Amino acid sequence: MIKQHSHPAFPEPLRKGDTIAILAPASIVKKEYVEEAARLLSAEGYDVRVFGSAVSEGTGSYSAPKDVRIAEFREAWKDPSVRCILCARGGYGAIHLLEDLDETLSFDNPKWLVGFSDISALHALMNRHEIVSLHAPMVKHLATRGHDAATRMLLRALRGEHNIEITGPASSFNIPGEATGRLVGGNLAVLNSLASTRFDMLSSPLADDCILYLEDISEAIYAVERMLFRLRMSGVFNHTKGIIIGRFTEYRPDRNFKDMETMIATRFKEWGIDDIPVAFDFPIGHIECNMPILNSAPARLTVSKEKSTLIERL
């Protein structure tokens, strides 16, 4: 049964001594990344529990067979000592877990879920149960970037801090304005794959009057354009108060557009999306400093041509 909250539920802030579980619900991950990330979190005062999927040799491209990944997530979620689940990696495979977890878990005692990219599928599960989660760096980032700005902000968010501020760069494509709403979004291809299912984040009650954020990797410009057309035709932009265009990486120019941002800006202009703030080139996605987004949390977006500012958890 879905519990309807007047406001999405925030997991309890992490305190020193709390347990963070590291597991790999999708693709295989390098063991050394997991070990280094565990050391960083342990040095912060947390008890770190590493599940087998995060250090396994893998099954094909997956970290472990589907049943093992489901069982590990279920075990971590049910364990009252675990207050945060840090997904080791995205890749592909998180969608395998959704139906089973939705049908077998109780979401009355929420805990933090951290990850991005393919983990957007699990954020959709949290959103369905109106629980705030973190679209944020995973173990490779913690292992290779250490205490950079994104890591520090992730730790602040886990500790329950309010008014977390992220700044985006100047962009000629930016559409100035200010909006408040709940942050809803993630990896565009994953969100698109969940359309018209019970996990469709963009048709959930929390998507009404939302600030939509999007990112992706290795998607052709035409493929992203096609997905944006679906969002427009399904009415998503009609109840969006602001839009954050994160980084779209590892693609090539095509014969129609030299880059992804030009295509998106062209379509937005064509569709009359000019009366809400739109921030381009925002520092989220598959980039070195992937800033954390509190999915389903209230936020304020302010955009000018010179910069964009997002303040999370008002």
Image: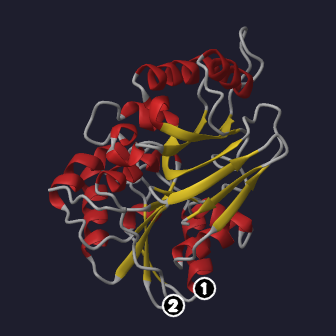
In the rendered image, residue 41, in percent from the top left (x then y), is placed at 57, 79
Q: Quadrant of the C terminus?
A: bottom right
Residue 188 image label: none
Q: Residue under circle 2?
A: 16
Task: Determine the residue positioned at 28% across, 62% down.
Answer: 5
The structure residue drawn at horizontal position 60% and vertical position 68%, both measured from the top left corner, is 154
User: Could you tell me the amino acid type at mark 2?
Assistant: Lys
Mark 2 vs 1, N-terminal side: 2
Tell me which amino acid carries mark 1: Glu
Secondary element at image label 1? loop
Q: Residues within 10 Å of mark 1 (few under 14, many from 20)?
A: few
For residue 44, which numbered disc appears in the image? 1
Pick whichever, 227 or 206, lies toward us: 206
Contact check, label 2 and label 1, Cβ < 8 Å: yes
Res. 284 visible in picture: yes
Residue 260: x and y in percent read: 70, 26
Residue at point 78%, 18% (across, down): 258
Q: Is residue 198 above or below residue 288?
A: above
Q: Which part of the image, by quadrant, shows the N terminus?
A: bottom left
Decide which of 141, 266 is in the foreground and name it.
Answer: 266
